[in-house]
Image: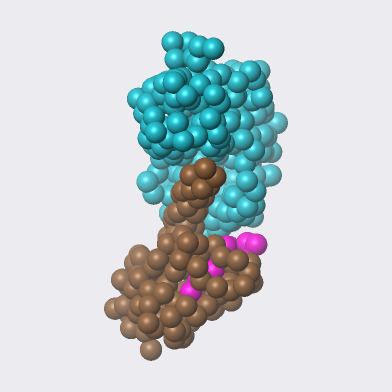
Chain colours: A brown, B cyan
Amino acid sequence: MISLDFLEKVDTFSDLDDDQLTAVQGCCEVAEFKRVEQIFAIGETPEYFWIVREGQVNLSWDLPDGLALPDNTITTLSEGMPFGWSSLVPPYKYRLSAHCASRSCKVIMIKNGCLTQLFKDDAEMGYKVMSKIMIVAGQRFHQFQDEVARRRGHDIINRW
Amino acid sequence: MSGLDVLEKVEIFKGLNHDQLNAVKKGGREKEYLLGDRLFAEGEDADRIWLVLEGQVDLRFDLPGRPTSEENTIFSITAAQTLGWSTFVPPFKYALSAYSATKSCKILQINKDHLLECFEKDPRMGLMFMTNVAGIASMHFDQLQESAAVRPVAKVKISVHMGTCGIAAGARQVMSALVEEISRSDRQDIEVVSSGCIGHCKNEPNITVEISGGEPVTYQKMNPDKMRQIFKKHILGAEVQKDYILND
């Protein structure tokens, strides 16, 4: 069982009161992955919104062979950081792949249908959470944009 | 087209009812811009949503010390489309500059503070809006992934002549200075190639600049400082540096 103390430290849920946190807690499951194991792949239809509970997770723009190549990593996430924001946003496709980047990773899985039902029942909670998820989406976009610019710089260097 | 007609068709307000759209519109202010007018500049505080009612707006990256140019347009936005989702994402700064690209351009500006006030009163409206804005971020993600998968077409070709004589005269240092400048400029349309000696060993290092298929210009006796100057003045500023041109 994920504690309310942990959930309230997750930025996505930091504006929620105890009743709202308890409702979110009811949607949470925990899963474990080993180093380099894939948590989800880019382009998949998502079922879960995720939070790192222990260890580190790499988000990468990888090839469809499922390998986590260090060069393709966009960002590395640690305890309390959310990922899989696109599970709550049309067109509901993961925009990056996620792999365990430490010896083992414990992650919280929150069924997207469970979360959106909570938002329907409590729009104030939905607004607070989606405002935070919007920030995560924007940050990932900017991180990806930076990575694309960096790679183009490397292309220039590699050509001579 | 009136503001309310347009609001109904706009992606970020999708799903809002008539009353909610009216509440949004109350905080809006219409403004007209002429061709070439700047709506906002890269790096400015992003504090409002911009809705194009009529005309077209270009989003461009501007180069320091150079006038804005259509060539640097990244996206064009037309009627019923919005700009400014950076308003809701830290660091809350515009990532590009926006210019009116038609003879006149009518815009509805809606302040972030007004929108947040509406959402406080009506969280269902806020939930819908934030979901729609995140959907736009997702769409931009998709567009960027598609464009990143395609190698950009080079409009500028810079050849660094790296024969043995060129390397001995310092061509590698010239190449390093060039690569640094390109990285700093964030220009993606520049191709750098290394080539052999062109038979002017006593005037090495040499480089040749070709812009958009124009006449090639070869420079002589290059060093990192001259390279930086040529990059800024010729490649970014279209001003050939006559003093350094190779004398046949």
Residue B38 appears in the figure: no
Direction from residue A125 to residue A45 in the image, left or right: right
**Place of residue B27 in the rendered image (x, y in percent of width and height, measured from the top left):** 49, 37
In this view, B37 is above or below B72:
above
The front one of B94 and B180 is B180
Marks counted in the figure total 0
The boundaries of the magenta stretch are A87-99
The front one of B142 and B91 is B142
In this view, A88 is above or below B218:
below
Q: Residue at x 44, y 77 (%)?
A: A100
Q: Residue at x 45, y 44 (%)?
A: B87
- When asked about the image quadrant of residue B184, the answer is top left
Say which quadrant the N terminus of chain A sits in.
bottom left
Residue A88 painted magenta: yes
Residue B28 painted magenta: no
Q: Residue at x 56, y 26 (%)?
A: B198
**Place of residue B140 in the rendered image (x, y in percent of width and height, measured from the top left):** 59, 50
In this view, A11 is above or below A2:
above
**Place of residue B23 in the rendered image (x, y in percent of width and height, measured from the top left):** 54, 44
Q: Residue at x 39, y 49 (%)?
A: B90
The front one of B107 and A53 is A53
Residue farthest to the bottom, as pictured: A1
Residue A150 appears in the figure: yes
Question: Main SS of the magenta segment?
Answer: loop
Direction from residue B142 to residue B223 in the image, left or right: left
